[in-house]
Image (cartoon, grey):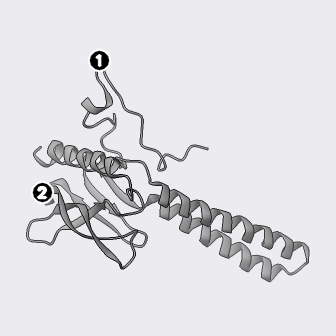
Amino acid sequence: MPLPFLTADRVFEAPGETAGDVALPFDDHDQWRRPYRPGPWRVGAAALLLLLASFVLLAAMIIAFASALPGAGICLGIAVVVIACALRLLRVGAWVSRHGLRRVGFFLTTTVAWDRASTVRTVQQPVRWLGLPRAVQGQALVVVRPGGEPLQLLTDHNADFLSRVEAFDRAADTVEAWSDEYRTA
């Protein structure tokens, strides 16, 4: 079963072009897209959650065969919550479309229209390491809104880009290209 939110879409190139020549490689710019692939830390955490959910579902089946249906229902509910958390964890990140930027968090999603974004740029600043309270010096892609504080979209120390500096640079360049294309339009 294809899961479109797990992989970046294929690049549409004209003959003689390379993937680096195409700034906005998607054919449908109205659809929300993640301009990068989820990182190994994020995918690994989701896989562990799904493994945990499979054990809980197995326990629910064993409990149901033992004729304790309320306990099986509780285990089934726990498994559904764990699966939903794993899927939500895979959706976390920055998304772009013709309409603007969207930062999807685990609990909160923030959308900024292109006309409400003053600048999109990469800055050196303290960033959270894997989303934990510990802060380290790193790079962040931020969108500055008029009269507002900067909204941090990506960092080079989050679950998508930890130890993958080149992938962070490509993702930041892609989001900045979308910004240049639609913020001025």
Give percent across and percent down for residue 159. Answer: 42, 62
Q: Secondary structure at mark 1?
A: loop
Give percent across and percent down for residue 82. Answer: 61, 70
The amino acid on which the numbered mark 1 sits, given as a three-letter code, is: Gly
- Is 55 in front, or is 4? 55
Give percent across and percent down for residue 130. Answer: 40, 68
Q: Residue at x 21, y 61 (%)?
A: 142
Outermost residue to the top? 15
Quick one: quadrant of the N terminus? top right
| Residue identifier under label 1 | 16
The amino acid on which the numbered mark 2 sits, given as a three-letter code, is: Thr
Q: Residue at x 26, y 44 (%)?
A: 174
| Residue identifier under label 2 | 119
Q: Secondary structure at mark 2?
A: strand
Crowding at label 2, few (<14), some or many (≥20) Cα neighbours within 10 Å? some
Where, by quadrant of the figure, is residue 135 drawn?
Answer: bottom left
Crowding at label 1, few (<14), some or many (≥20) Cα neighbours within 10 Å? few
